[in-house]
Image (cartoon, grey):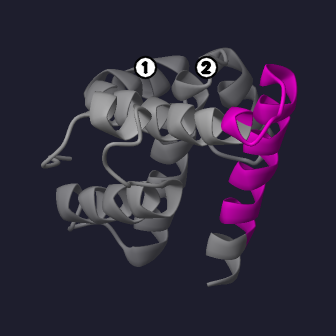
């Protein structure tokens, strides 16, 4: 994706760009890049690609995601996840910035670092729940 602002501006709170906007923009990018895919395949591609970005942004191992995908019946290989990661380095940096800004806001509210990270997980889960409904 191309933005008119940098991840640093987002992380510092100089530009308002949140998780919902990121997910909307990322979905649009996936749809544009794979326009010949069926709607169902696009949805799967979006979720796998977003999960790769999320996993990398929060410094989780792709091996965990691979296991999760396989448990859900998706036939993916580590090389596929690595290709998605490598093609989305800028998106991962932006997602990190979105999360950093959110954590900074929680800390400014008086939460400890640990509690801010827990609240970020809750916030992320809520956004995913909302997007699954709508």
Image location of residue 85, percent across then percent down: 40, 25
Q: What residue is disc 2 on?
A: 62
**Residue 20 in the figure: left or right of residue 36:** right
- Whether the magenta-drawn stretch holds residue 34 is answered as no
Picture quarter with the C terminus: bottom right
Q: In the image, is residue 51 above or below residue 112? A: below
Q: In the image, is residue 115 above or below residue 17? A: above
Q: Nearer the viewer, residue 35 or 77?
A: 35
What residue is shown at x 76% (from left), y 48% (from top)? 72
Element under disc 2: helix
Q: How many marks?
A: 2
What residue is shown at x 54% (from left), y 53% (from top)? 47
**Residue 112 in the figure: left or right of residue 58:** right
Image location of residue 130, percent across then percent down: 69, 74
Q: Main secondary structure of the magenta part?
A: helix
| The quadrant where residue 34 appears | bottom left
Q: Badge 2: few (under 14), some or many (20 or more) residues near its Cα, within 10 Å?
A: some
What residue is shown at x 78% (from left), y 22% (from top)? 113
Lower sequence index among marks 2 and 1: 2
Q: CA distance from mark 2 to mark 1?
A: 8 Å
Image location of residue 13, percent across then percent down: 41, 42
Element under disc 1: helix
Q: What residue is disc 1 on?
A: 82
Image location of residue 129, percent across then percent down: 74, 68
| The quadrant where residue 75 appears | top right
């Amino acid at each position: 994706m191309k933005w008119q602002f940098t991840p640093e501006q987002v992380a510092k709170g100089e530009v308002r760009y949140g998780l919902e906007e990121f997910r909307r923009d990322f979905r649009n990018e996936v749809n544009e890049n794979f326009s010949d895919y069926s709607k169902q395949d696009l949805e799967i591609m979006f979720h796998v690609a977003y999960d790769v970005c999320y996993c990398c942004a929060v410094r989780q191992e792709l091996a965990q995601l691979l296991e999760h995908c396989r448990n859900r019946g998706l036939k993916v290989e580590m090389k596929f996840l690595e290709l998605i990661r490598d093609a989305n380095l800028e998106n991962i940096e932006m997602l990190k910035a979105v999360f950093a800004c959110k954590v900074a806001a929680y800390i400014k509210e008086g939460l400890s670092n640990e509690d801010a990270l827990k609240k970020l997980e809750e916030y992320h889960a809520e956004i995913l729940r909302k997007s699954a409904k709508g």
